[in-house]
């Protein structure tokens, strides 16, 4: 029976209680980060309550003195090290009546919607404030003094261009930011379009948060995932449930959302994605006009991919079979971990083996077998833990 969490403790005390009960392994790296979170909790508790909002809105929104501002926390490290668990504990303990936790992309979508709404008001003569950022930031702060972001990553140029101005306003008002990420601040929006315009945000971020690395030697998520089969057959309710169980295990409490990978004026739609994991159906990947460049972009963006319901590949599915061959080759070449459910074992999926296509599919079947091996999975783990 799991112990009932006592969220009146500090984060580090709560971790100690979990390890004492046997619910959690002792992990000094997690404990170091917990102590930094405790520092934020202590400062939040002693900070005086935020001033009430003015009826005049953004113009008189309070701004904190530098001495009253609390330095937040930016936790970065490889997947599966416990960042989400620590955020769960901290967020429940945070003594703020106004706090918000969101995936970063979800938050930015809200910001862009608010900016669009403000511009519409300006167009309709409902406001004379031309710059939408200050009033949007003021409204966000009035709703949440504490912002907690899961999976802080910047991939969209529209987000990159607005972050510095938005967070200058938020930090000036006393907003406290806690964020988890797979990348260090200096690597945010790396190689992004017009990255020079984004760099001021990195400086602003580092000034207003303590940057800590969670470099636990154990990938707890992968330990759980390794207990799950990676190739399931045949296609039925049982295998669908098993795929869902493996996906839930991999999510480890996180929320997956649709995602688009930009591709030279178009985009590749990913039905479900979180961090560096994605889930597709066979139809999503092989019944649409995708090619080698698309599969390469997917393999570079994600290191774990789930593919549901690979069918038997008869003469009526020659194009789909060719795409499947290219897909498997690409994932294999990039060491991607593949979870798949299929109508048959790999060597039986192609109904007719003729010519070059038959030889190519023999290679595909061989690679699908190898991608299930302990050696391949260990190689995947080692490669991506080092990234």
Image (cartoon, rainbow, N blue to C red):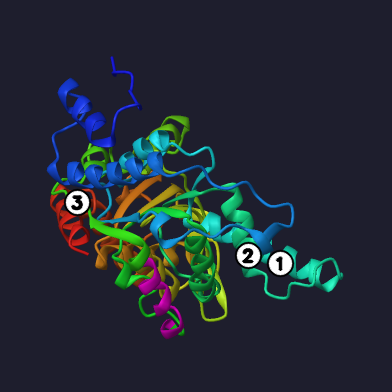
Which numbered tag is attached to residue 377?
3
Q: Secondary structure at mark 2?
A: helix
- The residue drawn where x is 53% and y is 72% is 165
- The residue drawn where x is 48% and y is 55% is 175
Q: CA distance from mark 3 to mark 2?
A: 40 Å
Q: Which residue is mark 2?
A: 112
Nearer the observer, disc 1 or disc 3? 1
Residue 269's place in the image compared with 218, above or below, is below
Q: Nearer the viewer, residue 383 or 153?
A: 153
Quarter containing the C terminus: bottom left
* Circles 1, 2 touching at the beta carbon (< 8 Å): yes
Earlier residue among tags 3 and 2 = 2
Quarter containing the N terminus: top left
Residue 286's place in the image compared with 250, above or below, is below
Q: Which residue is mark 1?
A: 116
Q: Secondary structure at mark 1?
A: helix
* Magenta extent: 195-205
Q: CA distance from mark 1 to mark 3?
A: 46 Å
**Crowding at label 1, few (<14), some or many (≥20) Cα neighbours within 10 Å?**
few
**Crowding at label 2, few (<14), some or many (≥20) Cα neighbours within 10 Å?**
some
* Circles 1, 3 touching at the beta carbon (< 8 Å): no
Nearer the observer, disc 3 or disc 2? 2
Asked whether residue 215 appears in the rendered view, the answer is yes
Provide residue 191's location: percent of width, then percent of height: 37, 80
Q: CA distance from mark 1 to mark 2?
A: 6 Å
Residue 84's place in the image compared with 201, above or below, is above
Provide residue 349's location: percent of width, then percent of height: 38, 51
Q: How many marks?
A: 3
């Amino acid at each position: 029976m799991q112990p009932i969490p006592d969220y009146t403790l500090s984060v580090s005390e709560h971790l100690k209680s979990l390890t004492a009960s046997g619910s959690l392994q002792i992990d000094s790296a997690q404990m170091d980060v917990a102590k930094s979170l405790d520092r934020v909790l202590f400062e939040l508790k002693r900070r005086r309550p935020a001033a009430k909002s003015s009826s005049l809105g953004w113009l008189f929104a309070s701004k904190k003195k530098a001495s009253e501002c609390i330095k937040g926390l930016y936790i970065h490290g490889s997947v599966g090290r416990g960042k989400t668990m620590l955020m769960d504990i901290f967020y429940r303990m945070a003594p703020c009546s106004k706090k918000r936790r969101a995936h970063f992309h979800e938050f930015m979508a809200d910001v862009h919607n608010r900016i669009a709404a403000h511009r519409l008001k300006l167009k309709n003569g409902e406001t004379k404030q031309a710059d939408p950022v200050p009033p949007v930031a003021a409204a966000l702060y009035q709703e949440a003094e504490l912002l907690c972001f899961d999976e802080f990553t910047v991939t969209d140029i529209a987000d990159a261009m607005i972050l510095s101005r938005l967070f200058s306003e938020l930090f000036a008002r006393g907003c406290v930011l806690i964020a988890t990420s797979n990348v260090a601040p200096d690597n945010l929006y790396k190689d992004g379009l017009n990255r020079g315009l984004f760099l001021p945000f990195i400086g602003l971020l580092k000034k207003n948060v303590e940057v800590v690395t969670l470099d636990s030697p154990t990938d707890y998520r992968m330990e759980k995932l390794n207990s799950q089969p990676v190739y399931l057959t045949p296609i039925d309710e049982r295998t669908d449930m098993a795929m869902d169980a493996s996906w839930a295990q991999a999510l480890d409490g996180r929320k997956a959302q649709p995602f688009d990978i930009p591709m030279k004026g178009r985009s590749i739609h990913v039905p479900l994605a979180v961090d560096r994991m994605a889930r597709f159906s066979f139809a999503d990947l092989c019944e649409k006009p995708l090619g080698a460049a698309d599969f390469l972009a997917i393999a570079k963006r994600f290191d774990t991919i789930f593919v549901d319901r690979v069918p038997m590949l008869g003469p009526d599915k020659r194009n789909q079979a060719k795409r499947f061959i290219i897909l498997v080759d690409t994932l294999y070449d990039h060491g991607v971990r593949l979870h798949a459910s299929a109508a048959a074992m790999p060597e039986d999926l192609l109904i007719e083996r003729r010519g070059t296509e038959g030889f190519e599919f023999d290679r595909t079947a061989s690679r699908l077998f190898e991608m299930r091996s302990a050696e391949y999975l260990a190689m995947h783990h080692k490669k991506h833990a080092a990234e």
